[in-house]
Image (tube, grey):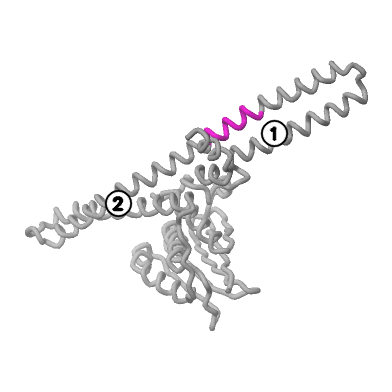
Amino acid sequence: MEVRKIFYQLNLPAQCRRYNVPLWQCPQVLFLIMGVIIIVAALTAYLIGIRYIEDPQLIALIVLGLSGILFIFAYIINVSFEQLAEASRIRTEFVRIVSHQLRSPITNLSWAIDSLMAGDLGRVEKSQLEYFQILKENSSRMKELIKDLLITSRIEEGTLPIKKEKVSLTEITKSLISGFLPFARASNVEIKFDFDKNLPEISTDPNQIKVAIENLLDNAIRYIGRKGEVKISLKKNEGKIIFKIADNGLGILAEDQKYIFQKFFRSKSNKGGTGLGLFITKSIIERLGGKIWFESKEGVGTTFYFTLPIK
């Protein structure tokens, strides 16, 4: 049992998978790199010492002292990184477990509310219907939050599968715009869609790309804040398809722009979002081999772009 534990500790890829971090961010790999640095520093100190110091004992003391100090620093840094990595792992696992446990009761609650609103258990008065509508809206928000948390935890754990197939990004975008029209009309927003004719199909995961576009479209409508418009375009350029979505809304505050893709980041102008949408969108686009970026000016609007390869 002890031998197996030792071999597991020496298995660096397994250790890194446990923490869900790249190899170069793994505490054990960092400690190994620091060990190499200590050896190089000790050899350098020895070579310099024999050149300028005649007493071999003094040279040995200097080399040992330097090595000891560097080792202590390396150990402290490694322990700190290991604690941070473990805390991140526990948090991700906690989010995943809680999200799974909440999904069933929220689904049952939504079903019960729909049944009550439909009058399956008796006539519903108008005053009661208003309260049921509030319950339905809040349960929908909870379902969206749980969905985002589950996607986020699967992205971090590396368990979100990519199932690529040939799809038309034009048709996917048209379908999503159609689904958002009631929300856009209620928000007094017009959606315009411009695309190159005969755009080729691309090999991508249709479900994941839908999530990415939904997040961008929802944000664009939600943050206009007044009568306005959202312009979406699809263009082909140098072996890639460029998706562009522009709004004439509130814009992103200059001090918030560098954090906008961070997980759980919520700007001062946040309108009830989870702080996960753009993190999920960026992760999806990059996993599918694309890039994402944006331009924004406060009070003028925001434009998001992403590219996907044509394969």
Tell me which residue sits at (50%, 63%) in the image. Answer: 247
Q: CA distance from mark 1 to mark 2?
A: 46 Å
Disc 2 marks which amino acid? Arg
Q: Nearer the viewer, residue 285 or 184?
A: 285
Q: Does residue 231 appear in this view?
A: no
On screen, residue 130 above or below 49: below
The residue lying toward the viewer, choosing from 205 and 19, is 19
Q: Quadrant of residue 191?
A: bottom left
Q: Is residue 75 magenta?
A: yes
Q: Which residue is mark 2?
A: 103
In this orientation, which residue lies closer to the viewer: 107 or 49? 49
Q: Earlier in the sequence, mark 1 or mark 2?
A: 1
Residue 100: tell me if it is visible.
yes
Q: Are marks 1 and 2 in contact (CB under 8 Å)?
A: no
Residue 35: mark in rendering:
1
Question: Is disc 1 surrounded by few (<14), some (14 to 19) or many (20+) residues within 10 Å?
Answer: some
Residue at image point 58% right, 59% down = 293
In x, y percent, where is residue 69?
Answer: 71, 23
Task: Examine the image and state in which quarter residue 237 appears.
Answer: bottom right
Above or below, 38 against 265 in this view is above
Q: Main secondary structure of the magenta part?
A: helix
Magenta stretch, residue numbers: 74-84
